[in-house]
Image: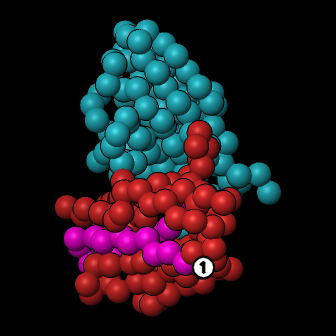
Amino acid sequence: EAGVTQFPSHSVIEKGQTVTLRCDPISGHDNLYWYRRVMGKEIKFLLHFVKESKQDESGMPNNRFLAERTGGTYSTLKVQPAELEDSGVYFCASSPQRTSGRREQFFGPGTRLTVL
Amino acid sequence: KQEVTQIPAALSVPEGENLVLNCSFTDSAIYNLQWFRQDPGKGLTSLLLIQSSQREQTSGRLNASLDKSSGRSTLYIAASQPGDSATYLCAVRQGGGTSYGKLTFGQGTILTVHP
């Protein structure tokens, strides 16, 4: 079974440009999460999808960030326009549906974003 | 607001030693706690998950304990090996509300096991 995949693995853009990150969760996982780690800080939650609906977007830093999950499968996270402080590693995770018990989260390899 | 602290920030030990990594959290109303491992430039690998009703979980040379009332968890690694070198992260998941899926992470412990 394939794990969580993320694309691209690295992205280098200039301040003011737009970047779109993609996450493909484990097949059949209803829950999809975005997290990020900026330099020197702990990993922080951004938002949580249940299927195609946003369950919790309390961690989204501002309206330059837009997350979508069309059809409840893969998700995209767009940053527009990117700022220097957006640099960091963006992780995606997925977990099975809420009634399945343990609800362990499985993480992807991350996308390293560098804004120059 | 939940806060997670991991001690020590870094640890260097010779191969073969048993070691303990510590994690503390401020809000004891958690649903579960996960320990992860992160290798340089890689994603997070889930090591152990402890439900709030459990006291410990074991996997091979790893044993994680949970004392929910005192807000503490420990990860015990027996007979450490150079391949155990990585950053170890602790994360807690709250019990309910809108943010029931959110994990709150500690800063991690960087472990180096030298031959």
x, y percent for residue A55: 39, 53
Q: Nearer the viewer, residue A24 or B54?
A: B54
Examine the rendering and report whether any part of residue A95 can be seen: no
x, y percent for residue A99: 54, 75
Horizontal arrangement in the rendering, residue A55 relative to residue B2 (left or right): right
Q: Chain of mark 1?
A: B
Residue at (66, 60) in percent of width and height: B115
x, y percent for residue B15: 63, 67
Quadrant of the image occupied by residue A86:
top left
Q: Nearer the viewer, residue B26 or A30?
A: B26
Residue A67 higher or lower than A87, as above or below:
below
Residue at (71, 52) in percent of width and height: A3
Going by the numbered disc 1, the residue's amino acid type is Ala
Tell me how many marks there are.
Answer: 1
Please tell me whether the stretch drawn in magenta is mainly helix, strand or loop: strand
**Outermost residue to the left:** B1
Q: Residues within 10 Å of mark 1 (few under 14, many from 20)?
A: some
**Residue B27 belongs to magenta span:** yes
Residue at (38, 10) in percent of width and height: A15
Horizontal arrangement in the rendering, residue B51 relative to residue A4 (left or right): left
Q: Which residue is mark 1?
A: B78
Q: Colour of chain B?
A: red
Residue A25 higher or lower than B54, as above or below:
above
Chain in cyan in the render: A
x, y percent for residue B108: 41, 56
Examine the rendering and report whether any part of residue A113 can be seen: yes
Q: Nearer the viewer, residue A19 or B72?
A: B72
Where are the magenta residues, as a range?
Answer: B18-37
